[in-house]
């Protein structure tokens, strides 16, 4: 079975039967997972920060690092797997991650800000996540299966869940 | 929820742990002294053949992208930097700490070292913003050492990880540290301090280990360094490198701003820098 593991800021799209895309230990990062049931294509991006303006040169080389450039680039990559079909019709989106430490200090709520930024950029494409498991103080590992779009979440000491 | 384990018994067991190597102790002492030179570091390392061999292996890993093979110790130390050298020395002489499996935290073997390395890099980055001058090398070593108590407490928590998580999730415990205290009557910072004292680590390291979750309880003289480790620990967890089930389940001490002069977006910038340096160091350390 082909398993593609994404690091921070990386993205992947796959239509190989049986393949899985996975990313480990999300922390405050957010995984955006996109699935096309008709064409059996799955995609994921591991977003670390809300906005690329903090480091544009990084966005140029690793657009997935930021919510604004990551969401846009993921959809561009995705269209190549759908026979060049642009737009987001037929796609479902799910989110995971965006956790925070136990703090009320607004500056430390990067997980929350990542989630909000991702939602805003998805909204610009007319998309709302079908489901999400975000926030809280939980480190999450997540995978998406190409065949079914099934998404599995795991965290140390906790039972795996499906979203 | 409290077990019948005595703190004296557990602390007594920390006294049976092997001592640190002479080279690690000397490196920690010397990097605290601002007058030290690279030659001082090289002199200490050169007397430790296994450490020299490991440094040459790490520096020749692809992550450091050297144009040619590095064969000399002086070049290896210059490329890696003295903080990474000290970190490697500690990991090598204390595998019973850093390579211990963290079953009590549902964390796999080697996770403690990765977490401590990431926290060390973050602690050093944070030290740049100190309201008073903070030695970045001391901040780095503080990050390497802050969680040594987890390797000792882990076995006492191994059957109760799920229970501790539930205590925090249902807010019966304020955080994972409180859950440890409720379950055992002590926590990983107390045992960590016992290990630090057994190793005869100089100040501020025992204080950093003891108070890294409660920096305002630390003696005022060491509070800046303790806050570096406190923030470094949390930043490492936010970046996804915790020690298992307890990841992110600790509180930020919001007095931190009294000890630093942070510019806008410092946390975002720090997360980025730490992520880059950690990936590079990890790849080199594991020979990837």
Image (tube, coloured by chain):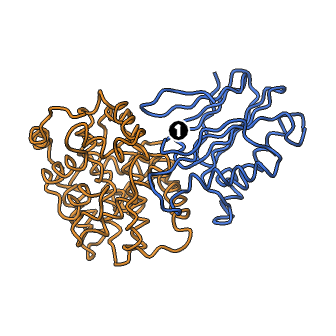
Q: On the image, which quarter does residue B229 sit in?
A: bottom left
Q: Compared with residue A62, is residue B262 higher up or lower down, i.e. above or below?
A: below
Side (left or right) of A65 relative to B193: right
Which quadrant holds the N terminus of chain B? Answer: top left
**Label 1 marks which chain's residue?**
A
Q: Position of residue B169 (x, y in %)?
A: 42, 39
The one of A100 and A54 positioned closer to us in this rendering: A100
Query: Residue placed at 35% from the left, 68% from the top?
Result: B136
Residue at position x 30%, y 58% from top?
B214
Residue displayed at 69% across by 50% down = A118
Q: How many marks?
A: 1
Frontmost residue, B237 versus B219:
B219
- Quarter-wise, where is residue A92 in the image? top right
Q: Nearer the viewer, residue B118 or A34?
A: A34
Numbered disc 1: secondary structure: loop
Judge from the rendering whether residue A56 lies leftward or rightward of residue B246; answer left or right: right
Vertical comparison of B205 with B17: above or below: below
Q: Pinpoint residue B138: horizontal percent, then vertical percent.
A: 30, 65
Answer with left or right where residue A33 lies relative to residue B249.
right
Query: Which residue corresponds to mark 1?
Result: A140
Q: Position of residue B134 (x, y in %)?
A: 33, 73
Which image quadrant for residue B7?
top left
Query: What is the letter of the blue chain?
Result: A
Please tell me how crowded label 1 is: few (under 14), some (14-19), or many (20+) other residues with Cα within 10 Å: many
Q: Position of residue A148 (x, y in %)?
A: 72, 23
Vertical placement of residue B212 versus A47, above or below:
below
Q: Residue at x 56, y 68 (%)?
A: B265
- Chain drawn orange, letter? B
């Amino acid at each position: 079975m082909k398993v593609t593991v994404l690091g921070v800021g990386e993205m992947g799209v796959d239509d190989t039967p049986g393949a899985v895309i996975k990313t480990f230990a999300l922390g405050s990062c957010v995984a955006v997972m996109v699935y096309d049931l008709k064409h059996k294509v799955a995609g994921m991006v591991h977003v670390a920060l809300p906005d690329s303006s903090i480091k544009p040169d990084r966005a140029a080389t690793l657009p997935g690092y930021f919510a604004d450039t990551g969401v846009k680039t993921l959809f561009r990559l995705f269209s190549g797997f759908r026979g060049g079909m642009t737009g987001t019709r037929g796609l479902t989106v799910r989110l995971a991650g965006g956790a925070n430490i136990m703090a009320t200090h607004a500056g430390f709520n990067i997980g929350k800000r990542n989630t909000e930024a991702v939602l805003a950029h998805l909204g610009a494409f007319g998309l709302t996540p079908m489901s999400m498991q975000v926030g809280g103080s939980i480190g999450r590992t997540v995978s998406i299966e190409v065949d079914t779009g099934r998404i599995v979440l795991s965290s140390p000491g906790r039972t795996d869940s499906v979203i | 929820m409290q077990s019948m384990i005595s703190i004296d018994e557990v602390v007594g067991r920390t006294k049976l742990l092997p001592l640190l190597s002479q080279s690690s102790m000397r490196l920690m002492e010397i990097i605290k002294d601002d007058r030290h030179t690279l030659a001082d570091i090289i002199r200490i390392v050169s007397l430790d053949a296994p450490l020299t061999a490991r440094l040459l292996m790490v520096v020749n890993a692809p992550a450091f992208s050297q144009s040619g093979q590095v064969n000399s110790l002086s070049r290896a130390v210059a490329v890696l930097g003295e903080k990474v050298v000290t970190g490697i020395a500690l990991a090598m002489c204390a595998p019973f700490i850093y390579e211990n499996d963290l079953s009590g935290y549902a964390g796999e073997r080697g996770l403690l070292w990765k977490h401590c390395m990431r926290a060390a890099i973050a602690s050093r980055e944070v030290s740049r913003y100190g309201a008073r001058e903070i030695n970045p090398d001391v901040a780095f070593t503080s990050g390497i050492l802050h969680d040594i108590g987890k390797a000792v407490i882990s076995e006492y928590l191994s059957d109760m990880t799920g229970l501790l998580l539930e205590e925090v999730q249902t807010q019966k415990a304020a955080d994972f540290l409180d859950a440890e205290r409720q379950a055992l009557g002590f926590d990983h910072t107390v045992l960590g301090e016992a290990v630090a004292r057994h190793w005869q680590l100089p100040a501020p390291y025992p204080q950093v280990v003891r108070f890294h979750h409660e920096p305002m309880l630390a003696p005022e003289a060491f509070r800046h360094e303790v806050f570096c480790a406190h923030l470094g620990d949390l930043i490492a967890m936010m970046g996804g490198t915790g020690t298992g089930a307890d990841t992110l389940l600790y509180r930020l001490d919001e007095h931190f701003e009294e000890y630093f002069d942070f510019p806008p977006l410092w946390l975002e910038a720090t997360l980025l820098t730490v992520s880059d340096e950690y990936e590079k160091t990890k790849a080199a350390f594991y020979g990837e």
